[in-house]
């Protein structure tokens, strides 16, 4: 069964304390892996698309990486404004390729 | 306006009411989506429209009725809802085929009493 698991469920960091969020997946062929950020009371905001193992994408303090089994979202020297829930979604390369499989997210809190 | 706009942002309705959620996108996209977000659950895809045509109904109960009059507007008509339908309803748009690169609205928080 296709599945996406995000860990940890929640993470609290001090400002400047770098860390990584994990998104592990099991799908029958990967078409794409997507990272989103969601602030409380708002819709998710698209961050990155990763297509193949070894690929990396960066945006400000965020860097997303991909292997054949998981993706990491590295947060370097986070600031309080990076506090949000980070969602991962995977699109399989077989069957009904319109559907995304979503994780439950990691809730990140960055303390000043 | 830019992006994806949803109205109303908050809605409280009784189980016998009829209401509608509205979504408008100003991104020039031709694919629009309704998602449901509930606590402790992953995002659930409800409906997909491509070029105004419904291309996916993810086994959604008939008390939810979508309407897409053009590529920029999407509605979700609600009637005879249940308390378990209380959730955040998110509208999104994308270029056709780019189902993972979604642009979401801020959502309509629905409470069914």
Image: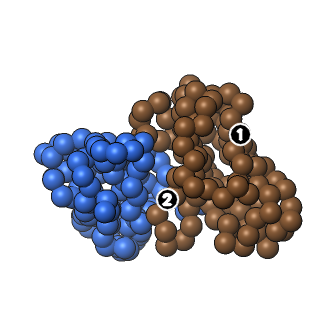
Chain colours: A blue, B brown
Where's the N terminus of chain B, which quadrant?
Answer: top right
**Residue at numbered disc 2:** B43
Return the residue nearer the eye: B85 or A42: B85
Mark 1 chain: B
Return the residue nearer the eye: A104 or A41: A104
Mark 1 surroundings: few (<14), some (14-19) or many (≥20) residues within 10 A: some
Which residue lies at the image location 38% right of the left edge and 67% below the top edge?
A106
Return the residue nearer the eye: A20 or A26: A26
Spatial separation of the CA atoms under disc 1 and disc 2: 21 Å
Using the image, determine if residue A60 lies above or below residue B59: above
**Residue at numbered disc 1:** B67
Which residue lies at the image location 54% right of the left edge and 71% below the top edge?
B39
Question: Can residue B2 be seen in this snapshot?
Answer: no
Using the image, determine if residue B69 lies above or below residue A59: above
Residue B64 lies in quadrant: bottom right
- With B79 as the anchor, is A84 left or right in this view? left
Name the spot of residue A110 as percent of width and height, x first. 39, 68
Name the spot of residue A78 as percent of width and height, x first. 32, 60
């Amino acid at each position: 069964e296709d599945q996406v698991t995000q860990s940890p469920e929640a993470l609290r960091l001090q400002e400047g304390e770098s860390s990584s969020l994990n998104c592990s997946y099991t799908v029958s062929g990967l078409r794409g892996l997507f990272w989103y950020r969601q602030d409380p009371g708002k819709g998710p905001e698209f961050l990155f698309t990763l297509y193949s193992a070894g690929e990396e994408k960066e945006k400000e303090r965020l860097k997303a990486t991909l292997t054949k089994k998981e993706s990491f979202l590295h947060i370097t020297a986070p600031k309080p404004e990076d506090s949000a829930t980070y969602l991962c979604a995977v699109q399989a390369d077989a069957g009904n390729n319109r559907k995304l499989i979503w994780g439950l997210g990691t809730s990140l809190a960055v303390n000043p | 306006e830019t992006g994806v706009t949803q109205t109303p942002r908050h809605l409280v309705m009784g189980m016998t009411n009829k209401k509608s959620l509205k979504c408008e996108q100003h991104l020039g996209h031709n694919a629009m989506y309704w998602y449901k977000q509930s606590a402790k659950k992953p995002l659930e895809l409800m409906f997909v429209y491509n070029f105004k045509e419904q291309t996916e109904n993810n086994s959604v109960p008939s008390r939810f009725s979508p309407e897409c009059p053009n590529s920029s507007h999407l509605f979700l008509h609600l009637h005879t809802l249940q308390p378990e339908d209380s959730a955040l309803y998110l509208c999104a748009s994308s270029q056709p085929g780019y189902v993972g690169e979604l642009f979401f609205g801020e959502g309509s928080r629905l409470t069914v009493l």
